[in-house]
Amino acid sequence: MPSVLVTRPLPSRVLAPLEALATVDMAPREGWPHAEIVARAAGVDAIISQLTDPIDAAVMDASSSLRIIANVAAGFDNIDLAAARARGIVVTNTPDVLTNAVAEFTWALILAVTRRVVEGDRAVRRGGWSGWALDYMPGMELAGKQLGLIGRGRIGRAVADKAAAFGMRVKFAKHDLSLDELLVTSDVVSLHVPLTEETRHLINRKTLVRMRRSAYLVNTSRGSVIDEEALAWALGEGLLAGAALDVYEKEPAVHPALLSFDNVVLAPHIGSATRETRTAMAELAVRNVVDVLNDRPAVTPVT
Ligand code: GLV
């Protein structure tokens, strides 16, 4: 019987097809240290991983029978793709099933930061609200404004599709405008690129100074697309109206300076976290493993 290593728990109702086919070694909620993943990977045929667990050459070399690494995420920057390719190991992710959930959450962040929802909640809770006032907590209206999207993959396009509901004009970097023109003209800039060597710190001191002082920055992609130190500097200098982040450079740590800004919304990497989508992601990862172990092509290989 083949064996499958699962680096974080999956919902029990998606496991049946896997358990019918293979022995399953599943980590507890807190996961395993890297060395234990390497040790437990010995002789396995498949690994189902999550983005908190780096899957590098050491893990891959623990088993000569490893055929597939199925990441339960759209992103796959936790997996050494070159090492997998060199060893002929299939890598899969879970695109499509999370597109809508992440797009909805991007809009949740856009609305939260432009309309000061979280800041307002904090004021109410600490007794800092003294009643309705004409000039109290004004935000930015979205209608008629420009939404600048960096990344025109499935999630970026799904965010764009929902923009009409808010009366926003959408521009994509590279496609409609150069990155610089996009930064200079947009009222909200939202990031939807994978983390690669080209996109690491794409948002840095140089690009941040190009943004409007009245503009908001939103990130539901990967933390390291933004240089957090530079973002903290730009916010401190008043170069931006605010930011809403779901992802960070060193999760679960957040750059301490970002914690002090009232105009920054900080979410705990929950962009795809709907019950529907998280189940569908786990199901798709299981399906990829079942297919490969049955000598069929994976449904969603990373290419
Ligand atoms: C989450 O960040 C994912 O890549 O699915």
Image: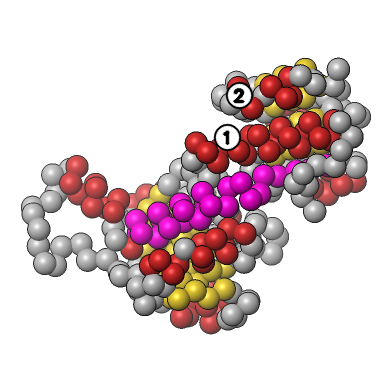
Does the magenta stretch mainly form a helix, a strand or a loop?
Answer: helix
Secondary structure under tag 2 reads helix
Q: Residue visible at 46% across and 52% down?
A: 105
Q: Name which residue lies at 9% across and 62% down.
A: 133
- The coloring applied to the image is secondary structure
Residues at badges 2 and 1 in contact (C-beta under 8 Å)?
yes
Is residue 92 inside the magenta stretch?
A: yes
The x, y position of residue 248, in whole percent, is 52, 49
Task: Residue 200: give x, y in percent of width and height.
Answer: 63, 60
Relative depth, front residue between 291 and 55 = 291
Which residue is under mark 1?
A: 279
Label 2 – label 1 distance at C-alpha? 9 Å
Residue at x-position 68% and y-position 38%: 284
Q: Which residue is mark 2?
A: 13
Please check the rendered image and state whether residue 3 is part of the magenta-colored stretch, yes or no.
no
Examine the rendered structure and indicate whether residue 239 appears above or below residue 97.
below
Q: Where is 75 relative to 201, above or below?
A: above
Q: Position of residue 192 (x, y in %)?
A: 57, 60
For the magenta stretch, what is the residue range? 90-113
Up/down of 229 relative to 141, above or below: above
Task: Name which quarter of the figure residue 16 lies in.
Answer: top right
Please say whether residue 229 is visible from this viewpoint.
Answer: no
Residue appearing at x 80%, y 53% in the figure: 303
Any part of residue 162 in sight: yes
Q: Amino acid at mark 1?
A: Thr
Which three-letter amino acid code belongs to the residue tagged 2?
Arg
Look at the image and tell me in which quarter the N terminus lies: top right
Q: Earlier in the sequence, mark 2 or mark 1?
A: 2
In the image, residue 223 sits, relative to residue 166, either above or below, namely above
Q: Is residue 18 left or right of residue 138?
A: right
Q: Is mark 2 within 8 Å of ligand 1?
A: no
